[in-house]
Image (cartoon, grey):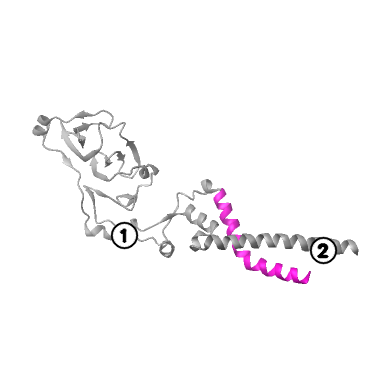
Amino acid sequence: MHFVRHWHARLGVLTAVFFLLLALSGLALNHTDALHLANYQVHTNWLMRWYGLKPSVPTRGYLFKDGYFAASGGRWVMDDDILLDQDLSESKQALVGAIAWGDMRAIASEDQLFLYLPDGTLVDKLSSIALPNTPIKRLGSINTDGKPLLVLETSQGSFITEDALTWRILKTEKTSATGAPAWGSEQILPATLSASLKHTFAPSLPLERIVLDLHSGRIFGRYGPLLMDIVALGLILLSLSGVWIYLRTVRRKDRH
């Protein structure tokens, strides 16, 4: 009894921190939606270095009259705001253009067109079904009768729209009368944006991912899951030894 009590106490002290870690992370994961863990981004420098993540700051992007758009490492940034909409991950094609269109910003990949407000709110996302043709080669705008029209250049010609709902082909005679479309093209981003870009494109991870890695032990590296397996075995031993101590104690009381 003395031997079991002695090692039961030592094992409990050694593994208490891991038990607390498992319990707290498990509670957090059970309520991940209520706690909004997936929406909270962690930018801590030492933690990102621990994960092996390095900043990927773009040197080129699209400049607007009163802002910019840049993309790197799967992250889209417009005027220092990260575009967080989950639909962005669905676009696997390369970006082909970004322009300011009236009071909105239009961003196009080869197979999709995204429309945003200047504050980063997604207004609409058009896929190939809602577009006149794909793949998109260029994105631009043209003024006709004082109205800014959005222009998509595809392999089947260029198409224009006033509302992104109805499209019609851009005729050659119309371009000669109004001038050629202003195409959105990548440019070297000005040096004045350097500090802002470094901050915005600093690596980050959702808090949910970090809590999940803590719970599984993967945050401790290659052998982290093995460590948590050992902790789990320790919990089993603690449970068995605790039951054994309890039963022995009860038997002694019964004898007395």
Identify the image quadrant of residue 20.
bottom right
Q: Please tell me whether mark 1 sits on a helix, a strand or a loop.
A: helix
Alpha-carbon neighbours of circle 2 within 10 Å: few (<14), some, or many (≥20)? Answer: few
Q: Quadrant of the N terminus?
A: bottom right
Q: In the displayed image of the protein, which residue is found farthest to the right?
A: 256
Whole-percent x and y of residue 22?
59, 58
Classify 157 as above or below 205. above
Earlier in the chain: of badge 2 and badge 1, it is 1
Q: Please tell me whether mark 2 sits on a helix, a strand or a loop.
A: helix
Q: Nearer the viewer, residue 77 or 225?
A: 225
Whole-percent x and y of residue 118?
30, 44
Classify 89 as above or below 15. above
Q: CA distance from mark 2 to mark 1?
A: 64 Å
Are dots 2 and 1 in contact, CB under 8 Å?
no
Specify the segment rendered in magenta.
1-30
Q: Nearer the viewer, residue 59 or 216?
A: 216
Q: Nearer the viewer, residue 210 or 33?
A: 210
- Residue 18, magenta (yes or no): yes
> Residue 249, labelled with which disc?
2
Q: Quadrant of the C terminus?
A: bottom right
| Residue receiving disc 1 | 198
Viewed as shown, does residue 167 lie left or right of 8? left
Residue at coordinates 59% horizontally, 60% vertically from top-left? 229
Residue at coordinates 20% horizontally, 44% vertically from top-left? 184
Whole-percent x and y of residue 166?
26, 28
Viewed as shown, does residue 178 lie left or right of 38? left
The type of residue carrying mark 1 is: Lys
